[in-house]
Amino acid sequence: MRAQALSHRDEILKDLLRPSILDQPDFATALGFLLSRKLGGDLIRKAAILGLVRDFQRARPRAVDAAAADLRALRERDPAATDHVTPFLFFKGFQAIQSYRVAHWLWQENRRPLAHYIQSRASELFAVDIHPAARLGQRILFGHGTGIVVGETAVIEDDVALLQNVTLGGTGREAGDRHPKVRRGALIGTGAKVLGNIEIGEGARVGAGSIVLRPVAPFTTVAGNPARPVGDRHEGLPSLTMDQSLPSADYII
């Protein structure tokens, strides 16, 4: 209904909304159409990407449910998402995560060069770089998306929120399992760098611009460079409220 109303309001938008949403029979096919138009190009045709996404959705039907859950989470938690149509069509973070899901499936199917193509193409388009081997849950929110980097052995559990320019990276000194594990409901603020095989506990909050080199306990807020705990342990999941305020300002960055 929202897409129909928007197409009536602005004639120019009809050329976008009709093939992307209004002419599609369901969410899965609309998502496939969207990803094929985004990820296809001169080297790999849009039709080939569309077929690939359809194969993925048939092989992993729960991924469609995860995409829908991501979209609902955006609508509920991001004040910029005033409807479901806007984040579906225009939010880079949402589209980058859905592209990652295809690449992750390809990685698991040992079609790794093609997985890297999807990763590279998505990085070019969305300025979000998620390694295909990383493990992501659902209802994940990438605020703005730009500059987010997720390393090969990183884990992002359900209901996590990452804001722009967050890095889940390695320290550059080790191989193997070398990236952060972000547990359910954690919130990582703008520009934070979380480095190494460390755990960001359930419901933890990382302040903007922090450099995190050590594990963060559940329901704890850390901030600074290097990051350290500030204030008392809190209750609830900060990613659901998107409350980025720090409990105390008497720390030195």
Image (cartoon, rainbow, N blue to C red):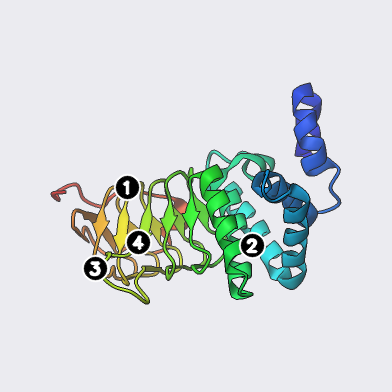
Q: Is residue 141 visible?
A: yes
Which residue sits at x=30%, y=63%? 195
Q: Amino acid at mark 3?
A: Arg
Measured as percent of width and height from the top left, residue 132 is found at 53, 65
- Quadrant in the picture for the N terminus: top right
Q: Which tag is nearer the camera, tag 4 or tag 3?
A: 4
- Crowding around mark 2 (Cα neighbors within 10 Å: few <14, some 14 to 19, many 20+) is many
Whether 187 is drawn above or below 203: the answer is: above
Q: Give me the disc on residue 214.
A: 3
Cα separation, mark 2 vs mark 4, equals: 22 Å
Task: Give the mark nearer the N terminus: 1 vs 2.
Answer: 2
Up/down of 164 relative to 196, above or below: above
Q: Which mark is residue 102?
A: 2
Q: How far separated are the C-alphas under marks 1 and 4?
A: 24 Å
Q: Circles 4 and 3: CB distance less than 8 Å?
A: no
Going by the numbered disc 4, the residue's amino acid type is Gly
Q: Nearer the viewer, mark 1 or mark 2?
A: 2
Q: Quadrant of residue 211?
A: bottom left
- Give x and y (percent) for residue 142: 49, 51
Badge 4 local density, few (<14 within 10 Å), some, or many (20+)?
many
Residue holding disc 1: 245
Observer able to see residue 76:
no
In the displayed structure image, the side of residue 66 where residue 151 appears, left or right: left
